Image: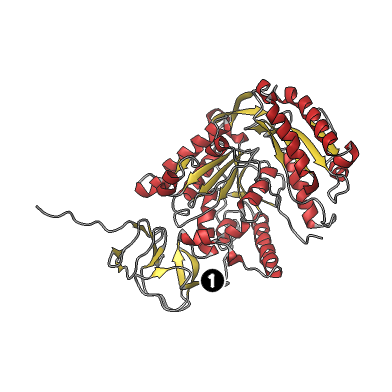
Amino acid sequence: MNAPVAQPPRSVRLNAADNVAVAVDPIEPGSVIHGATAKVRIPRGHKMALSALADGQPIMKFGQIIGFAQGAIQPGDWVHEHNVVMHAFERDYRFAEDAKKEEILPANLQATFEGFRRANGEVGTRNYIAILTSVNCSASVARFIAEDLNRSGLLDQYPNIDGIIPLVQGGGCAIDVKGEGYDVLKRTQWGYATNPNVAGVLMVGLGCEGFQIGRWKEAYNIVESDTFRTMTIQETGGTKKTVAAGVDAVKTMLPIANKARRETVPASELMLALQCGGSDGYSGITANPALGAAVDELVRHGGTAILSETPEIYGAEHLLTRRASNRAVGEKLVERIKWWEDYTSRNKMEMNNNPSPGNKLGGLTTILEKSLGAAAKGGTTTMTGVYEYAEKVDTKGFVFMDTPGYDPVSATGQVAGGANILCFTTGRGSAYGCKPTPSIKLATNSEIYRKMTDDMDINCGDILDGVSIEDKGKEIFAKVLEVASGKRSKSEELGYGDAEFVPWTIGATM
């Protein structure tokens, strides 16, 4: 009886121009992969050289440069941070070269979901009352108000309300009130107050902070109403009186917010935030391109998707500028890239400080490699707009928002921009939620899906077993519609989302 023939470990060469392959399974010494014999053990998700690379020669993955050889690299060598460096190189932006008019399905053929239609015409996927804070000094009072109401059991009488959430933040004072940081916080607060997933707002301040509620209201012509109230601790008379007044204010909002009812609306009302965190060597092969396929489907149905995390498209931005709807849109993205180069330089940092140690353990080596995988979340459609952090997104289709790569800060900007649902890919197992916007977790590999099944909504690791990117994209799109209609995501079931409101702090703390 013949002994079974040992199968070589699985690996992926993503482009014919690539001089590395990605190990799907661990590659043991002596294994032959794409004609090269492994000299050392290659961990899963990591890269093996397929040809000899001279010192300084570009290392190619996805058909793009992800770094440069540091010293000679031989076929079969492990290619990672010990023998890869990153330095500047020219990118050919070729603005709007691949722009095209997207074919949008007619309204009668578009997918639908069950959402909350607001008075201004926007649609929410959730129905929250939010307690915002103008300053760190009022954070505890905001929490006390929410805790008092949640402990009371009063919400049991209002089944159409998803919860009362204290969205507290650590800034609001010791800032230049004429500076960029103030403007960003002002936009972020207004974006959350007007997000379609929020039915009522209470803003609580101290009274003497830099971020004055009165000035904020004046900037946006805010008029107080039954569902929009503000107060300060100093004017109200201290902590206990403010908590009592806050509880009373929210109580008057509850019956009004509870009148909201879900109704059938088209998928064109969805604004999907795209996030990745705890990325690994599989992210750019499985979950990210699958999410990109779902984005293409959403755009076809008339919806909007927001790609962000500017440091994590660094080195891939030239692929996005080619998809810009016009040169001005592409140049705005390049402008933000140059801002980040200056921002990191004056803070004595470098763009390659990202990837994180966890990303590197998962197989990623440089920010260029991470960015090429992260950009895949944006699919293939035309980029119709580029927005600054927390700026209101008013364009349909695929857009970009300038944010940091740090997930809570990035997602905060997207939600402020109007995102009413979010998809988050992860290979290492990020623990994250995003009230008031539901977060759907996509595992990049089957191992992390099995280990953290209570946290993960969809396993994209089965793409490595033969499931197509297109089919996985359809699965993700169906899940987005389901969660948008009220099905709770795993993050929501676990209760995540109260601590993930993190506005971007720019500039000096005075």
Quarter assignment of residue 483: top right
- Check disc 1 and report its element: helix, strand or loop: loop
- Image coordinates of residue 460 in percent, x first then y, are 44, 45
Q: Residue at x 83, y 39 (%)?
A: 239
Residue depicted at 76% across the width and 44% down the height: 139
Tally of numbered tags: 1
Residue 296 left/right relative to 468: right
Residue 343 higher or lower than 137, as above or below: below
Q: Quadrant of residue 472?
A: top left
Identity of the residue drawn at 83% across and 31% down: 245
Query: Where in the figure is residue 406, as x and y percent of width and height?
Result: 62, 54
Residue type marked 1: Met
Query: With 49 as the anchor, is 122 left or right in this view?
Result: right
Q: Is residue 222 visible?
A: no
Q: Where is residue 137 in the image (x, y as percent from the top left)?
A: 80, 47
Residue furthest to the front? 240
Image-based side of 73 in relation to 154, left or right: left
Q: Nearer the viewer, residue 494 or 383?
A: 494
Q: On the image, numbered disc 1 is attached to which residue? A: 86
Report whether residue 186 is seen.
yes
Query: Between residues 326 and 51, which one lies in front from this camera angle?
Result: 51
Report the quarter where the C terminus lies.
bottom right
